[in-house]
């Protein structure tokens, strides 16, 4: 079964403002999301993929993609 996070749950997970998530949805900068009948939800798998894409070794060097794979 797919787990979903609402805006407040994701904001808490990342310690950011829910308004930041709203802005990211508007600009297309955040993780993929689902909108059904006016409600926004983030699939946990999409959130984890978004996090993995931004995983860094240092301030200058992203983690190589093959290093992230199990």
Image (cartoon, rainbow, N blue to C red):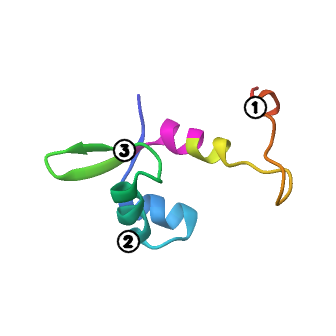
Residue at x 43% of width, y 60% of height: 9
Q: Position of residue 35 (x, y in %)?
A: 24, 45
Q: On the image, numbered disc 2 is attached to which residue?
A: 19
Q: On the image, numbered disc 3 is attached to which residue?
A: 33
Q: Which mark is residue 39?
A: none
Q: Quadrant of the C terminus?
A: top right
- Of the image marks 1 and 3, the number of the one nearer the N terminus: 3
Give SS at disc 2. Answer: helix
Instruction: Give me the C-alpha separation between circle 3 and circle 2.
Output: 15 Å
Q: Position of residue 48 (x, y in %)?
A: 58, 42
Q: Position of residue 55 (x, y in %)?
A: 73, 48
Q: Is residue 36 left or right of residue 24?
A: left
For residue 19, above or below residue 67: below
Instruction: Give me the C-alpha separation between circle 1 and circle 2.
Output: 30 Å
Given residues 12 and 55, the one toward you in this image is 55
Q: Is residue 12 left or right of residue 51?
A: left
For residue 67, above or below residue 21: above
The magenta stretch is 42-49
Residue at x 38% of width, y 65% of height: 23
**How many neighbours does mark 2 have within 10 angstroms: few (below 14), some (14-19), or many (20 or more)?**
few
Given residues 26 and 50, the one toward you in this image is 26
Q: On the image, numbered disc 1 is attached to which residue?
A: 65
- Of the image marks 1 and 2, the number of the one nearer the N terminus: 2
- Of the image marks 3 and 2, the number of the one nearer the N terminus: 2
* 18 drawn magenta: no
Q: Quadrant of the N terminus?
A: top left
Residue at x 42% of width, y 39% of height: 3
* 47 drawn magenta: yes
Give SS at disc 3. Answer: loop
Q: Is residue 38 left or right of residue 43?
A: left
């Amino acid at each position: 079964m797919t787990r979903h996070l609402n805006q407040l749950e994701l904001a808490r997970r990342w310690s950011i403002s829910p308004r930041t998530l709203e802005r990211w949805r508007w600009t297309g900068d955040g993780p993929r999301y689902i909108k059904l009948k006016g409600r926004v939800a983030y699939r946990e798998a999409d959130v984890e993929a978004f996090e993995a894409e931004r995983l860094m070794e240092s301030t200058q060097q992203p983690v190589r993609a093959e290093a992230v794979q199990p």
